[in-house]
Amino acid sequence: ELISDFRIRDALLRRLLLEDDLRRNVRGQLLTAIGHVSQSHRSAWLTVMGGCAWIDGNADFTGIAIDCALDCDPMYGLARLLSRAIRAGVPAQVWRDSLSAVTVEECLAGAA
């Protein structure tokens, strides 16, 4: 349930930005495990899955994951932000650039 801590979530997304194989592996593991995650933590997991998919340029999967995250928690901040960006047609490169703007350490400190 560590992913539910926004600092861990953001640091994970930042770390996965540059590691394609690891990112796909983590996304697959999250997808496999999501049915076993408590309802209170699902939004975070789904948002990480969606964020990873958007890094890969898969806006369709991102939209599905983010919609599911918002079904679990309509006020989940990062899911709301990603939902707006996807619906506005923001290119995936903007997401990658925003993740690149911070370090993993800064994310863990809550700066992201």
Image (spheres, rainbow, N blue to C red):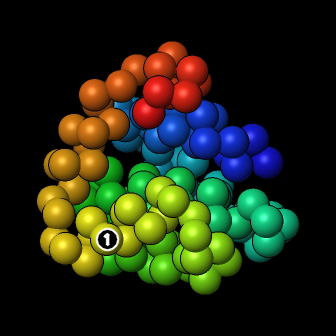
Residue 12 visible from this viewpoint: no
Q: Please name whichever residue, 16 or 85, is drawn nearer the observer in this view of the structure.
A: 85
- Asked if 57 appears above or below 104 in the picture, the reply is below
Q: Position of residue 19 (x, y in %)?
A: 40, 33
Mark 1 crowdedness (10 Å alpha carbons): few <14, some 14-19, many ≥20: few
Quarter in which the C terminus is drawn: top left
Does 77 sit left or right of 6 as displayed? left
> What is the x, y in percent for residue 3?
68, 45
Q: Give the secondary structure at mark 1.
A: helix
Percent across and percent down for residue 21 are 43, 40
- Above or below, comparing residue 44 to residue 21 in the picture: below
| Foreground of the two, 67 or 26 | 67
- Look at the image and tell me whether residue 92 can be seen: yes
Extreme residue in the top direction: 105
Count of picture labels? 1
Give the amino acid at mark 1.
Answer: Arg
Q: Residue at x 48, y 64 (%)?
A: 79
Q: Left or right? Give the position of 36 relative to 94.
A: right
> Is 2 drawn above or below residue 11 in the view shown?
below
- Left/right of residue 6 with respect to residue 97 in the rendered view: right
At 34% from the left edge and 31% from the top edge, which residue is drawn?
18
Percent coordinates x, y for residue 110 in the rendering:
55, 28
Q: In the rendered image, which residue does mark 1 sit on? A: 84
Residue at 50% in and 73% down: 65
Question: Which residue appears at 25% of the width and 77% of the height?
Answer: 87
**Residue furthest out toward the front:** 75
Which of the 4 image quarters holds residue 86? bottom left
